[in-house]
Image: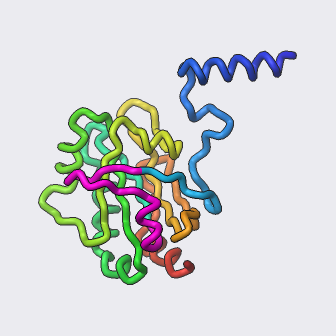
Amino acid sequence: MLLARRSLLASFVLIAGLVPAAFADDAKPPAVGDAAADFTLHSLSGEKVQLSELTRQGPVVLVVLRGFPGYQCPACTAQVGEFSARARQFAEAKANVVLVYPGVADGLGERAKEFVGTKVLPTGFHLVTDPDYTFTNKYHLRWDKEDETAYPATFVIDGEGKIRFASISRTHKGRASAKTVLEELKKL
């Protein structure tokens, strides 16, 4: 009886929005072997970027950045720089690289432009914004704490939309390297 009451209470609380979705039974980030949930986000130029369209072209490397937690994250900058420096190898693997920049919708585009600065992303790289954490919540990667935005994460998704590699960091560091991701792409 107590278990039934707890379950009923938990359901009510979730429906009422009183408890973050991370406490729901099925609220786990994607893992290896899962089908990647489709999403559509927009690039800084307004171009629609949809996961299912990209996977039809080949594998997708999905990199979830921290966005703007009050500053431009140096670990994110370093990770994007490392991946960009190996753009030719990602192109040879026929992989698109999607960089997700999450945050509060107000001013997010300007912050993302600041993040890129004057650099031009390589062909096959897509920086997209995630206003109000819609994607981040869908993938259960929201780091819902003061001065935080999203858990840094990297996924390799094959042409069928299946996750073949997943790395989620619960700190600012501990991110998947470009070398590791390229090795995973070779396995496809």
Q: Looking at the rendering, in which quadrant would you find the N terminus?
A: top right
User: Which residue is pictured at 37% across the width and 60% down the height?
Assistant: 98
Magenta-colored stretch includes residue 157: no
Q: In this rendering, would 78 be left or right of 22?
A: left
Where residue 159 appears, x then y in whole percent? Answer: 51, 70
Where residue 79 appears, x then y in whole percent? Answer: 34, 62
User: Which residue is pictured at 51% across the width and 46% down the height?
Assistant: 139
| Residue reaching furthest to the right | 1
Magenta-colored stretch includes residue 42: yes
User: Which residue is pictured at 39% across the width and 50% down the height?
Assistant: 40
| Residue reaching furthest to the left | 118
User: Which residue is pictured at 53% across the width and 69% down the height?
Assistant: 158
Measured along the vertical axis of the image, is residue 139 above or below residue 182? above
Pick whichever, 183 or 17, lies toward us: 17
Q: In this rendering, would 185 be left or right of 9?
A: left
User: For the magenta stretch, what is the residue range?
Assistant: 40-60
Measured along the vertical axis of the image, is residue 52 above or below residue 94? above
| Numbered-mark total | 0
Where residue 186 appears, x then y in whole percent? Answer: 51, 81
Pick whichever, 115 or 18, lies toward us: 18
